[in-house]
């Protein structure tokens, strides 16, 4: 299977997993839980759409089933924030939900705009080093966007563990 199949499936079902957690922990009246479901689920659906419309060559590589499950396990750590919100009935103030949503939205912009720019630029000039647009600000504006997306999720959980996992992921994988 291609790496993208493991990643797309995982991110694509994130909203379902979050809603299942909401149901299991009976968080019907928790606005933070609903917002978490909407943000994480929305991101997962947008990721799958992006993967279909402007795929990243990096994820088109084939991978073994064991390596795919390793990817799946690593990505599952990102669900921890939602589990914390649901299991511990985390309810943050409205201003904090707004702040986390803004961080998430800015991350969505950087992530998807950079991926679309990269896809288009490399189709026009294969192998070309992209140095304009968002790539004039950073070599990895898409990773910066993803960092902000998951920071928004982690801060919404109002717990140190999702932020620690994000920092470990950045240090261990991205750097």
Image (cartoon, rainbow, N blue to C red):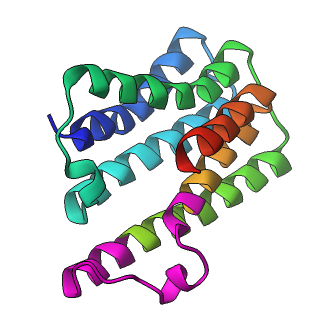
Image point (66%, 31%), residue name:
165
Front in this rendered view, residue 118 or 43? 118
The residue nearer to you, when weighing 27 against 135, is: 135
Left or right: 82 in relation to 20: right
Q: Whole-percent x and y of residue 75?
A: 46, 31
> 119 or 22: which is nearer to us?
119
Residue 31 shows up from this direction: no
> Which residues make up the magenta segment?
116-144
Residue 67: image location, x then y, percent = 30, 26
Which residue is the extreme one toward the top? 24
Vertical order, 46 against 79 (above or below): below
Q: Is residue 82 magenta?
A: no
Q: Is residue 100 left or right of residue 106?
A: right
Quarter-of-image position of residue 144: bottom right
Q: How many numbered marks, from 0 up? A: 0
The image shows residue 112 at horizontal and vertical percentages of 43, 66
Q: Residue at x 40, y 44 (%)?
A: 44
Q: Position of residue 26 (x, y in %)?
A: 60, 12
Q: Residue at x 64, y 55 (%)?
A: 148
Q: Is 121 placed above or below 103 here?
A: below
Most foreground residue, 82 or 57: 57
Q: Is residue 19 above or below residue 35?
A: above
Q: Residue at x 54, y 54 (%)?
A: 146
Residue 165 seen from this side: yes
Report the side of 107 relative to 17 (left or right): right
Where 100 sits versus 141, above or below? above
Where's the N terminus, which quadrant?
A: top left
């Amino acid at each position: 299977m291609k790496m993208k199949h493991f990643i797309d499936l995982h991110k694509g079902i994130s909203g379902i997993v979050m809603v299942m957690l909401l149901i299991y922990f009976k968080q019907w009246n928790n606005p933070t839980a609903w917002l978490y479901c909407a943000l994480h689920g929305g991101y997962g659906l947008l990721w799958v759409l992006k993967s279909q419309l402007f795929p990243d060559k990096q994820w088109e590589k084939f991978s073994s089933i064991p390596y795919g499950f390793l990817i799946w396990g690593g990505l599952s750590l990102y669900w921890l924030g939602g589990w914390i919100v649901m299991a511990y009935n985390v309810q943050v103030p409205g201003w904090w939900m707004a702040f986390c949503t803004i961080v998430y939205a800015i991350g969505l912009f950087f992530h998807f705009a950079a991926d679309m720019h990269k896809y288009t630029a490399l189709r026009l000039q294969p192998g070309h080093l992209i140095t304009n647009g968002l790539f004039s600000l950073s070599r990895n504006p898409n990773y910066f966007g993803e960092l902000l997306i998951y920071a928004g999720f982690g801060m919404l959980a109002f717990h140190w563990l999702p932020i620690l996992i994000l920092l470990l992921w950045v240090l261990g994988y991205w750097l």
